[in-house]
Image (cartoon, rainbow, N blue to C red):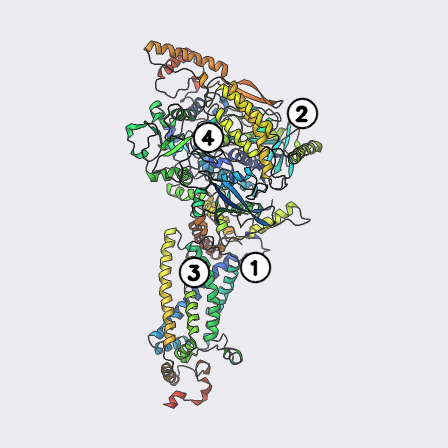
Amino acid sequence: MSKQRVVVVGGGLAGLAAAMKLAESQVQVDLMSLTPVKRSHSVCAQGGINSVNEQTRQLGDSEWKHFDDTVYGGDFLQHQPLVKEMTEWAPRIIDLLDRLGVTFNRTPEGYLDRRRFGGTLFKRTAFAGATTGQQLLYALDEQVRRWESEGRIQKYEFWDFLGPVIDDRGICRGCAAQHLLTMEIRVFPADAVIIATGGCGLIYGRSTMSMACTGSAASRCFQVGAKYANPEFIQVHPTAVPGADKLRLMSESARGEGGRVWVPRRPHDPRDPLQIPEDERYYFLEERYPKYGNLVPRDIATREIFNVCVREGLSVEPDRQCVYLDLTHIDRHELDRKIAGILEIYEKFQGVDPRDVPMKIFPAVHYSMGGMWVDYQRSADGGLVLNSPTNHVTNIPGLYAIGECDYQYHGANRLGANSLVSCIVSGLVVGTGVETLLKGLPHGAAADQPAALFATALSQHEHMHHQLLNRPNGRENPYLLHQQLGEIMTKAATVVRTNDVLDQAYGQVSELAERARHCSLSDTGQWTNQNVVFTKALLDMFPLAKAILKGARMRDECRGAHFKPDFAPEGISEGSPTERRQQAEAWCDRFEEGNRRWLKTTVADWRDHEPAISYEDVDVGLIPPRPRLYGLVGAEVIEDVWRERSARRPAQSSQGSAQGASKPQPKPVGA
Amino acid sequence: MANVSPADSSSQPFLARHEFLIRRLHSLSGLVPVGAYMVVHLLTNASVLESPAAFQRNVYGIHSLGRLLPVVEWVFIFIPILFHAIIGVAIIRGGLPNHGSYPYARNIRYSLQRASGIVAFFFIAWHVFHMHGWFHADWWLKTVATPLAGAQFKAFNATSTAGSAIQQHWLVSVFYAIGILACVFHLANGIWTMGITWGVWVGPIAQRRAAAVCTAGGIALAAVGLGALGGMATVDVEKAKQVEDRMFHHKLEAGEVPNDSHKRTDGDHKDDGQPADMARK
Amino acid sequence: MNAPSANASNGHSVSASKSDHPEFFQVRVLRQDQPGGDCYWQRYRVRYESDMNVISVLQRIAAQGVTMDGRAVAPVAWDCNCLEEICGACTMVINGRVRQACSALVDRLLADNPQEIELRPMTKFPVVRDLVVDRSRLFRALQRVRAWIDVDGYQDQGAGPRVSREDQEQAYPLSQCMSCGCCLEACPQYTKIEVLQQAGESAAEAQARTEAAYDHGFMGAHAISQAVLFNTHPTGQMAASQRLEQLTAEGGIQVCGNAQNCVAVCPKQIPLTTSIARAGRAVTVWAWKKWFDR
């Protein structure tokens, strides 16, 4: 056992959760990260972490309802066993974090305080101010540091993952990585490699993501045979603050704490927003979605904001798209207690106090629901077989993916405050699964592989590195190419997608990828060469960018964050009740037809330098898909029709409804 | 992977191993006895403002310790000051003042604390030499201290000797003023930082209040110190000496003081039995 | 994502014109090619755009790749990640003051000094290259004070201890420390420790020597504050004496000189000096007990 090692790539929430879980089980872990793990992108998560809790339970909430909200919010595109498992673990995950010392906000009685987040009617979200991700990451970072001081975890910070080492049987035996300071390339033999490198927002140039979120690690696996699923599902967060270098997130918790989104009814009303009377304000989310109000799921809020600005021309400013996110009606002390962190960000970067003046916000690329394809083992009750080494393994044995960089849990749209749960759950799940794997090692141990395997991998990566450094200087500037890539992707593959723009973008990206091969390096040194590291990451953005565009191009429907107006179902027009009913029937027919055709996972394979797309069925065995309307005004008739249709169908899946699933048996969080 | 444990490595040098204790003793010694002594010293000296006799009376009070006095001086004053000074120098060497880049009031006080410590160190060294002479062995007084204008203070001629020592040159008063102010600042600010170090005032509001109190105390003590200096600088030395001699003879007759030539201006005539000025009368 | 007009990435096409700004401004960067190497100044000219911060300035410099006198040079190396002042990576000395590059807005820097913006690496940490420094000593200090909670394990054992709102509100600010190093850079008592690998010495040996040197140096305000954070947590408290032991070891709290720069420069406004005073009180009591209770 002592010679067995596991490499965890990425030190965000998922990677740290996996590392600490493995370390607890006596496994020797090499933890690799581009930055000191405490600086990982998880720190940027703001709002909170979801779970059913004692307060919501009293109001009729349950794990099952959290599960239902999640798949409904994700437009049914996720495999349900994982989501079920996640929502059942969620309360225990929060208990664990609580024990680890996370400074969650408290009720006057000393229990965890909760707030409401998008896509649910329950106050499920535990939070630590408005820096919940930071607080959670630090708690796990501390645990990892504890194991580090005991020698159980060896950190490799400032190391760039270059790719898995795969033997001729197609099994992952470790990975190669490069030190960002000394530029040394090294291979790390390992019995399992766990990729936990987060999203790929930098493909869009500016997004809410951190500079490390290039997607390069996932892309490097993709290019050597790992499948990449649902690439086209990119979440655009409704509320961000535009900046020259980055679009800074303005958490959903601002709305969770009562923030209201509005625009003046008169376009570009020049008045001070506080002087605009209530009846001249258009609270468009509240008017259109009275049930959920400002807390509709993100894809819907984003589209509505986009529409109000672009189609209806009601942007607050004439020369820039934005809407008001208004907190000025809320008590300052309350704001400071609960969301000071994000208000300070706004204050620091915009120079305006959002407690006094409504914020100006606009959507920004935020999260990648898609990611590396990973497997799971379904249990008899529709959950996961815990301890199974199949959970979260990619199509390459020994190579695992967890956290944002896998494609599970969130389907076509992620609900706010669910990502922190999914990261930690997947980290703990993979920890127990890999522990089982190490006990069996069906394909033999990495330590027993011929040295030549690793030596070859090393020399290949060294060769590639030197080739990049020594090739004749082209004229292309990698930083400018990156800017152009970001512009193309932002235009083609965000809120609104059309096939002609996607086709055009694919051509442009292919051309950019070709030009990128002639990048000129302004630094060819062998010490802390950020230029070559960036260029490598840039080169690896193109395969994912192509997969995103191609996935989006081929999916001719609307689902969650993927919205194509050309394939959008028609709404219900005004008319007599009979007409409306007919329209609703037709709507439901198209909906069912759409699901038969498109309720499938997009799976991308890298073949001959192009992504090849295929489709896989989605496990929707527990909760059947239903129209996703969130109580949209004017669409009630569709819900009526759908209810009647469901009632006519044999009752196959109502067994797990709220009461049935009441309180699950306690299950060890990690064991 | 090496464990982190500087706390239990017994191979470290003594000073490193006991850094905490030494620093805390340094902090404490600044208040007690050094700071406390300084307050008493300045208050005593300021009694010259009342009258030379009052000051002389106080000095007699101190010197009633007799043979124990040098022991007390060394144990409770000189050694603590030396300890405080030497550790202080080590502390100063371990820091890099940066009030240029970060000109915040408290940072400036940090730098001033170190500057005033150095000034105080040299001042006290010179002041003790100037007045006390450092050692009272005859050979030292004869061959070193007196020739170098040290050891000028004579306890039984307290006011006149101190006064004339100060009045030697106007620069002496200037040096004393600087030295006293440096010591007072060092003590007042030192008490404030000590309160943080020992955890007496914790929160920012408490620390601000403490700073106000220390400032007020410092100003008061500076007034006392400068008052004492002013008193010494303006006292009529001749008159004072007459008073002192009268007092001395009373005490001598009452057997309350030894006839210690080291403590008198005219000590050389100790067999004379009659003070010179009395004889002149 | 961004709407068409807000989408300008090579310069904002539009912006609320904020009076007269120069078309270009100068940036002076203190560069150093490798650890222990010589440092030298280089000047760059950057085109002014609205809403720039120092990160975007460095991005422009990297993209243009030439100095003010037109010489092609390797891009300046710097550290950054989140760009919203929460990861702590991009700390550097800007116009003489330590802070995060991402929240250093060009408009304000130019308002203070219209001539140029001066960028230097932090001075208390070994320079790796240009503006990149090695802050591993900072993380090492977190190991020293055992800045974690020794839970029994990660199984389900129910909720954690109940915590009053007041205690949470006291702990939360401390737990916001992002290990950026500002408090250490500004601290006059925190001095640089740089151990260079010697000829014939392996990287591991040099590493061990470095760590040993770090463990004797001052731990700094951030670590003291973390010790206080964990010593006030109901579970963390159980290991309080171990942390106090470390706080009173060489390089512990006694090195603090009460200059209080830490609290003045902390970008998260963490009450570091309050933590220091609280730790001071705790070690006073603890040391007293240690010496006289046995």
Is residue A197 shown left or right of residue A70?
A: right
Instruction: Identify the amino acid type marked 3.
Output: Gly
Instruction: Identify the amino acid type marked 1.
Output: Phe
Tell me which chain the residue with mark 4 is part of: C
CA distance for labels 4 and 1: 64 Å
Q: Nearer the viewer, mark 2 or mark 4?
A: 4
**Do the residues bearing badges 2 and 4 touch, measured as CB atoms within 8 Å?**
no
Image quadrant containing the C terminus of chain B: bottom left
Q: Where is A630 relative to B42, above or below? A: above
Query: Does label 1 lie on the same chain as label 4?
Result: no
- Give the x, y percent position of residue B117: 47, 63
Instruction: Identify the amino acid type marked 2.
Output: Arg
Is residue C234 shown left or right of residue A602?
A: left
Q: Secondary structure at mark 2?
A: loop
CA distance for labels 4 and 3: 57 Å
Tag shown at residue B190: 3
Q: Residues within 10 Å of mark 4 (few under 14, many from 20)?
A: many
CA distance for labels 2 and 4: 47 Å
The residue that label 4 is drawn on is C7
